[in-house]
Image (cartoon, rainbow, N blue to C red):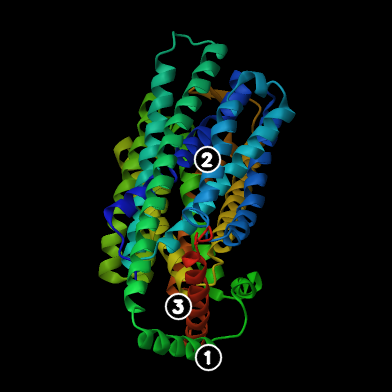
Amino acid sequence: MTRLTRLHYLAYSLGHVLNDAAAVMWFSYGLFFLHELCNVPAATSGLILFAGQVADAVATPLVGILSDATPLWLPGGRRLVWIALGCACVVITFPTFFSPAVAATPVRSAVVASVFNVGWAMTQVAHLSLAPDMGGGERAQLLLSAVRQVATVVASTCAFVLVRVALALLPSPPSAAASAAAFHGCARLVVGAGAATTACCVGLVALTQRRQRAAERKTAADATSSVAHRASRASRERARLSAAPTESVTESVRLGEWLQQPLFWAIGLQYTCARLSINLTATYVPLLLLEVCGRTVDEVASVPILMYVGQIAGAVCAERLCMHVGKPRALLLSALLSAGASLALRLLLSNALPAVVGAVCVQALASSTVLVVVVAMQADAARAFPWHGHGFLYGTHSMLDKLSSGLAIVLLQRLAQRSARGGSAANGMALPAGGAARSAFVLGACVVPCAAATLSAVLCARAALAPPTAAEGERSEARAARAHQIDTDVLARPLLPAHP
């Protein structure tokens, strides 16, 4: 078993920074940029972002399948190529999306948004799939999930602060052209810093894998130094491979077998619930405080930062909680806490702001803990069924996340538009006024996250995340042994023929 060092954790934490920082601007300011600053009609703006989300949902499982089929002999393995390719797509298209010249043509803007989301999906799926490939035990996978969540929150906070500072430096009142130029400048800074962190991730992971393979080759050379030992080892390998299934590794990568695993769907539902809760609270809590609680923009401005602090605390607490009570119980406790915090937020709307903000922070902490534990469970499932198809696992789960979150927001916005006869301005964004809009914000910030957390707790309580049966374990071990043998042969094969 590979022992992960601090260099492994640092390298892995840097691989998704570009995606996280870009996602903050995309989700928080994409509609505002198109509709308010570039005068794109509201319906057209929604269709542009929806085109990007559809491209993302379609690309995630395809990227998972293609990354699983990528040759192992490439530098850094099969995942780093897709991380670098996704980074290139994001670097090219993300500043282009925040360009007024591109936004003036809806078709061009939709194409750029689609390519950006495809690149985003490449990096996301490949980065998630990289964790099981790095090795380590259950605790190592849990720590990888935790450092990834911490890096996500830090990158999101930095991007949010960058936009706030850039807009604050504009002359008052800022013109639409000046604000659009500020957003374009922020997008260029985000992709510059994100490209640097992604390059560090690719370089460090390739370095650690090169060192690991050199150590494995040295160990194998020492073990095969004597002819007698080589003969005995060959006989043992022949006996082991004859007992293993006769199918090849390519044949073992059967997507239908993943889809037949109850564990695949159980963890997928858990991941979807966790992401749905986080996405909806991030979107609707500020609107809830503005429109339902009647808070001012200055009072609400610090709430996203406090939510990010709560998410960092949740990521830090997840590892210790899992070590004490195990992943299933940790998931159950954090899901119950998330449901309770969402319910408390609904009951405390008429109270003082500190009580409401406290409920929001607890909700963010619990949701972050749920997400860290579920991502670690995804890695455990990939290691329990090591068929070199876990890219498909991450891609399909991400597709479920994108579709569920997009559908929930579309339905809530349709509910809000029922009373959109007028609007109240909040931070420059026109918001619908009326009872239906307030109901949509309450549903998005409290009710739906509470229902998602409750469903997660019910799934966990019903032991839907049970480990594989003995027969499944024996079968997966046999396939893993055969896959490892062929992988070792491929990696040990020289790239160029030796000179005489």
Q: Residue furthest front?
A: 500
Can you identify the residue that label 1 sits on?
243
The tag earlier along the polypeptide, 1 or 2, is: 2
105 sits to left or right of 444: right
Give the amino acid at mark 1. Answer: Ala
Q: Position of residue 481 (x, y in %)?
A: 48, 79
Can you identify the residue that label 2 sits on?
87
Give the amino acid at mark 2. Answer: Cys
Q: Nearer the viewer, mark 3 or mark 1?
A: 1
Residue nearest the observer in this picture, 308 or 223: 223
The tag earlier along the polypeptide, 2 or 3, is: 2
Residue nearest the observer in this picture, 266 or 448: 266
For the N terminus, the quadrant is: bottom left
Can you identify the residue that label 3 sits on?
466
Q: Is residue 148 above or below residue 217?
A: above
Q: How many marks?
A: 3
182 sits to left or right of 328: right
The quadrant holding residue 152 is top left
Q: Position of residue 349 (x, y in %)?
A: 40, 41
Q: Are marks 2 and 3 in contact (CB under 8 Å)?
A: no
Q: Residues within 10 Å of mark 2 (few under 14, many from 20)?
A: many
Q: Mark 2: which secondary structure? A: helix
Residue 469 visible? The answer is yes
Q: Residues within 10 Å of mark 3 (few under 14, many from 20)?
A: few
